[in-house]
Image (cartoon, helix red, strand yellow):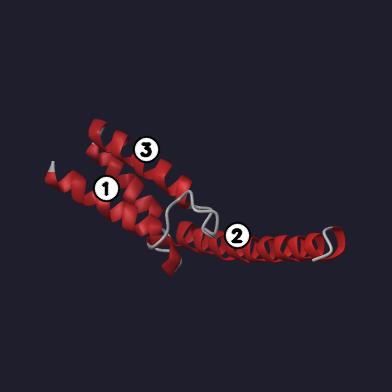
Amino acid sequence: MLQSRALVIALILLLSTTLPEVHSKSVFEKDRRDWLVIPDAIAAYIYETVNKMSPKVGQFLVDAAQTPVVVVTRNFLIRETTKLSILAEQLMEKIKNLWYTRVLGY
């Protein structure tokens, strides 16, 4: 039991090591830039369920999550979604400024 909990914690830590802001913000905060928190939570839940049924398959999932292909792909997705989030935030700020200056006349 203790070993499986340690593996779950290790998997969660492996999957959640992204940006420093990931550890300090709630999933539902609107300023959050990390879009992979929900898939990480789903992956941890799947791992926990599979590990209860078969520890060997659970260990396989841990090993698969640590392969270079998965790690590189995940880091790429994190980088690109963060860039998209920043661009979306900037666009929303410009739209808001236009709304206040052009439409409302502030």
Instruction: Tell me the element at label 1.
Output: helix
Q: Amino acid at mark 1?
A: Val
Q: Amino acid at mark 2?
A: Thr
Q: Is residue 55 left or right of residue 100?
A: left
Instruction: Tell me the element at label 2.
Output: helix
Q: State the CA–CA distance, disc 3 to disc 2.
A: 23 Å
- Other-residue count near label 2 (Cα within 10 Å), few / some / many at <14 / 14–19 / ≥20: some
* Rendered-image quadrant of the N terminus: top left
Res. 64 visible in picture: yes
User: Farthest residue toward the right?
Assistant: 102
Q: Amino acid at mark 3?
A: Ile
Q: Nearer the viewer, mark 1 or mark 2?
A: 2
Q: Position of residue 19 (x, y in %)?
A: 45, 67
Q: State the CA–CA distance, disc 1 to disc 3.
A: 10 Å
Circle number at residue 69: none
- Other-residue count near label 3 (Cα within 10 Å), few / some / many at <14 / 14–19 / ≥20: some
**Location of mark 1 (residue):** 8
Which one is earlier in the sequence, the residue at label 1 or at label 3?
1
Which one is earlier in the sequence, the residue at label 3 or at label 2?
3
Circle number at residue 46: 3
User: Farthest residue toward the left?
Assistant: 2
**Location of mark 2 (residue):** 81
